[in-house]
Image (spheres, grey):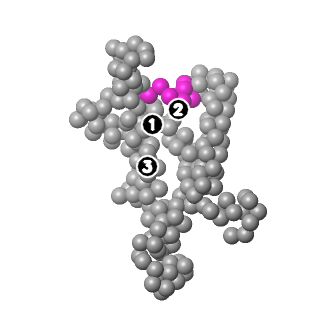
Amino acid sequence: MGYILTATPYMWLALVLSFLLAFSWRIFPLSGGYGFNLEPTLTWLFFTDLVAHWVLPFLSLFLVMFGGWAIGMRNMIIYELESDYSRYLEVLGAPQSLVRKYAFRNAMLPQITGLALQLGVIIGGQLVTEIVFSYPGLGHLVFAAIQSADYFLLQGIFLFIIVGVLVANFIVDIVYVIVDPRVRVSMTGGTA
């Protein structure tokens, strides 16, 4: 299933989700950022309507990203379980749960790095997804700025996106220090 989700283009998955969940089953609204009959206010009704309109664009982006993450995680766990240290632990008689714990922790490290790299790809898919759902987000604003040749707006949007991706990468680097003890030891000047 992960291979299918990874190979699926964002816009095609957005069309399928909108047809199934919005048009056929009427679970979520079909388009827009909030209902046409609502006025933007700080009320619970408006907030729930915002979330209902947000779910389908988020779901189409998340499913494609999650498919790639699941495939990568599966492959990394298989690689770690077949590595030398896993076999060495098994020979020493370590419980299988301990071997899997170490394999999972070591398989998680490349996935954290991949998440940081995947953020830029998600921004690219956001443009087409927001056009499919007529969602008034940054992707829709980029499209409107391109149509009207508003280069200053495009520069501001790209600056905002670049700063957002840099902050997210910084947060991922902090998480990497927390998850990987070798990085903590090397930061303090000790030996691993």
- Name the secondary structure under disc 3: helix
Q: Distance between the residues labelled 2 and 3?
A: 17 Å
Amino acid at dot 1: Thr
The residue indicated by pointer 1 is 129
Q: Tell me the chief SS of the magenta region.
A: helix
Residue at point 47%, 62% (across, down)? 73
**The C terminus is located in which quarter?**
bottom right
Residue 87 visible in image: no
Residue mark closest to the camera, 1 vs 3: 3
Residue at point 28%, 37% (across, down)? 21
On the image, the x and y values in percent for residue 162 come to 65, 38
Q: Which residue ends up furthest to the left in the rendered image?
A: 25
The magenta region covers 133-144
The numbered mark, 2 or 1, whose residue comes first in the sequence reads 1
On the image, the x and y values in percent for residue 45 come to 34, 20
Give the numbered dot on residue 19. none
- Where is 170 relative to 88, above or below? above
Confirm whether the magenta stretch covers residue 143: yes
Q: Looking at the picture, tell me which residue is in the foreground, 138 or 86.
A: 86
On the image, the x and y values in percent for residue 75 come to 47, 67
Give the numbered dot on residue 64. 3
User: Would residue 65 appear left or right of 27 to someone viewing this image?
Assistant: right
The numbered mark, 1 or 3, whose residue comes first in the sequence reads 3
User: Would residue 119 appear left or right of 162 to someone viewing this image?
Assistant: left
- Where is 42 relative to 186, above or below? above
**The N terminus is located in which quarter?**
bottom left
Confirm whether the magenta stretch covers residue 75: no
Image marks 2 and 1: residues in contact by CB distance under 8 Å: yes
Choose top left, top right, bottom left or bottom right for residue 143: top right
Q: How far apart are marks 1 and 3 (CA)?
A: 12 Å
The residue indicated by pointer 2 is 139
Amino acid at dot 3: Val
